[in-house]
Amino acid sequence: MKSLLLTHFDAIFGPKIFMHAGITSVDEVKHIPPLMDLYKEGFFYHEFNKDKSANLSFQIPSTYARGNYEILMLTYLVRDDELNPIMAREYLTRFADHMMRIDDGFKAFYVGSGKHPGDPRKLDEIKELFDSLYHSLPAAINVYAQKERKIFVFGLTKAGKTTILDAMRNRKVKQLQPTIFMDISKALLPDTNVSAMIYDAPGQLKYREMWAPNIAGSDGLVFVIDVADKDRFGEARAVLHDIAMRQETRVLPLLLLFNKVDLKKPKVKDLVKALDLDKLGPRPLKYFETSAITGEGVVDAFAWFGKELSKIA
Ligand SMILES: Nc1nc2c(ncn2[C@@H]2O[C@H](COP(=O)(O)OP(=O)(O)OP(=O)(O)O)[C@@H](O)[C@H]2O)c(=O)[nH]1
Ligand SMILES: [Mg+2]
């Protein structure tokens, strides 16, 4: 199955499929509209059972809607097939750009609503755009050679590991509880063809015995540190060197995330020294200043990491 869906956020009913191609009934894809509540605006990739979807959440101006915009989500969904997310993103973005340029396009969403006067011509215009997108999707969009990698994410408790992984996926950030088990999930690293099995380690001391058995077979390491928490730099350094300099880890690519820069602008030189980064090589190693809350630096960091991981045979 290959389908294209346009979901509209309805003020009363919530996210609802507004237009579709390639399916016979919206029941087949009822797990898609709720993604709108789970992810932030922008592009995201989601896998569920045999479904792979590339999604773009975006807004168009509207004088009818609260906040003066309509929230939409365009989804390309395949079942039992491959999906090239990088290519899908290009096509979805092109559609959104066109849609934003339709004057009063929002009136399409109110045809027959009884709430506001809709405009059937706008509906036709969007339908035409939608159908032409569906028919112009090239066969290559279903060809994709993913590289499977395993990455181990560690650091002290409350550094922001779990939050930053959500930010990387473009998920809405919720207030999280500390991780208490090894949290294993799959995600696509942004702008790469690396599909990563991510091991998000619990940072609390009492759970660290869970780490070692889960490091085996890792292709790369991610270390997260809270830059505002100077008192724990020493402990962070010890943990970093213990994990990253083992026999089986010492040459693995290492991504360092100097996190929570929204709270405190770090003195990077001091951090590099406090963590003894020059004693962690030679290996692919890079640090990024990030904020899991604002998203600053997150995509760049994981895109670099993904490129390093895709170089490994
Ligand atoms: N201001 C700010 N807060 C952050 C940032 N990243 C995470 N937080 C907050 O820090 C707290 C801890 O974040 P988590 O992601 O749970 O930390 P963790 O490293 O997974 O912690 P453990 O699971 O115990 O190892 C949460 O309240 C987050 O909202 C950030 O970049 N900026
Ligand atoms: Mg956590």
Image: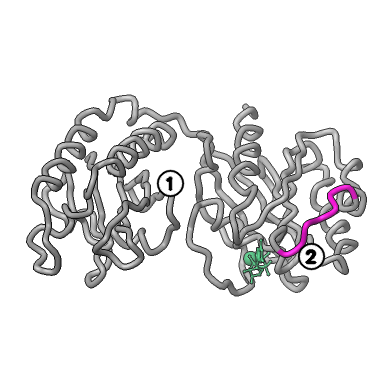
Q: Name the kind of residue labelled 2 in the image.
A: Ala
Between discs 1 and 2, the one toward the N terminus: 1
Q: Name the kind of residue labelled 1 in the image.
A: Phe
Residue at label 2? Answer: 228
Is the residue at mark 2 in contact range of ligand 1, meaning its CB lies under 8 Å from it?
yes
Q: Nearer the viewer, residue 306 or 213?
A: 306
Residue at label 1? Answer: 43
33 vs 157, left or right, is: left
Q: Image height check: is 243 above or below 227?
A: above
- Measured as percent of width and height from the top left, residue 256 is found at 74, 48
Q: Which residues are magenta?
A: 263-269
Is the residue at mark 1 in contact range of ligand 1, meaning its CB lies under 8 Å from it?
no
Is 185 colored magenta in this rendering? Answer: no
130 vs 289, left or right, is: left
Q: How many other residues sit within 10 Å of disc 2, few (<14), some (14-19) or many (≥20)?
A: some
Q: Nearer the viewer, residue 105 or 267?
A: 105
Q: Image height check: is 87 above or below 12?
A: above
Q: Nearer the viewer, residue 103 or 55?
A: 103
Q: Image height check: is 80 above or below 214?
A: above
Is label 1 in a helix, a strand or a loop?
strand
- Measured as percent of width and height from the top left, residue 243 is found at 80, 52
Q: Main secondary structure of the magenta part?
A: loop
- Measured as percent of width and height from the top left, residue 156 is found at 76, 64
Question: What is the spatial separation of the Cα atoms under label 1 and label 2, in whole angstroms?
Answer: 30 Å
- Which quarter shows the C terminus? top right
